[in-house]
Amino acid sequence: QVQLVESGGGLVQAGGSLRLSCAASGRTFRSYAMGWFRQAPGKEREFVGGISWSGGSTGYADSVKGRFTISRDNAKNTVYLQMNSLKPEDTAVYYCAATWQSWQSTGWVSKTSVYDYWGQGTQVTVSS
């Protein structure tokens, strides 16, 4: 069993930055591929980015590519989402998720059905 807790959300002006953290319980954290998703009011949950268990592979949605960066520290059981050049359309609740399965591709890790565990989410609001 893995529990995921996101933190770092908040209110920021357009053009600003935030770093989200996702802390995981369990000694097998380093075995999991991880993903970040977001959900805006009235919209479906959408993929933001993913990272393999080693951190050697990452993939991003086109909407955030070049602005967001995923990283992980397996010694701290934590995955991060660095968000730069934020836009009002980035406003959403951000969720991290974990899967037992090994990284296959960005397309594969973008599917919500891949994931076994989800966090509760953290709100990110970007003002114009």
Image (cartoon, rainbow, N blue to C red):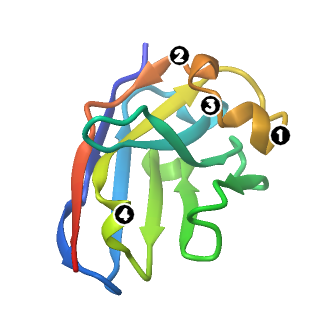
Disc 4 target residue = 89
Q: Nearer the viewer, mark 2 or mark 1?
A: 1
Q: Residue at x 35, y 55 (%)?
A: 21
Q: Are marks 4 and 1 in contact (CB under 8 Å)?
A: no
| Disc assigned to residue 26 | none
The amino acid sitting under disc 4 is Glu
Question: Pointer 3: what residue?
Answer: 32
Q: Earlier in the sequence, mark 2 or mark 1?
A: 1
Query: 103 or 113: which is nearer to us?
Result: 113
**Disc 3 from disc 1: Cα separation:** 14 Å
Q: Residues at badges 3 and 1 in contact (C-beta under 8 Å)?
A: no
Q: From the image, state whether disc 3 or disc 4 is nearer to you.
A: 4
Residue 123 place in picture, x, y as percent? 21, 51
| Identity, as a three-letter code, of the amino acid under mark 1 | Ser
User: Tag 2: residue type?
Assistant: Asp
The residue drawn where x is 46% and y is 60% is 81
Pointer 1: what residue?
Answer: 105
Q: Could you say whether the residue bearing mark 1 is in a helix, strand or loop? A: loop
Q: Secondary structure at mark 2?
A: loop
Disc 3 element: loop
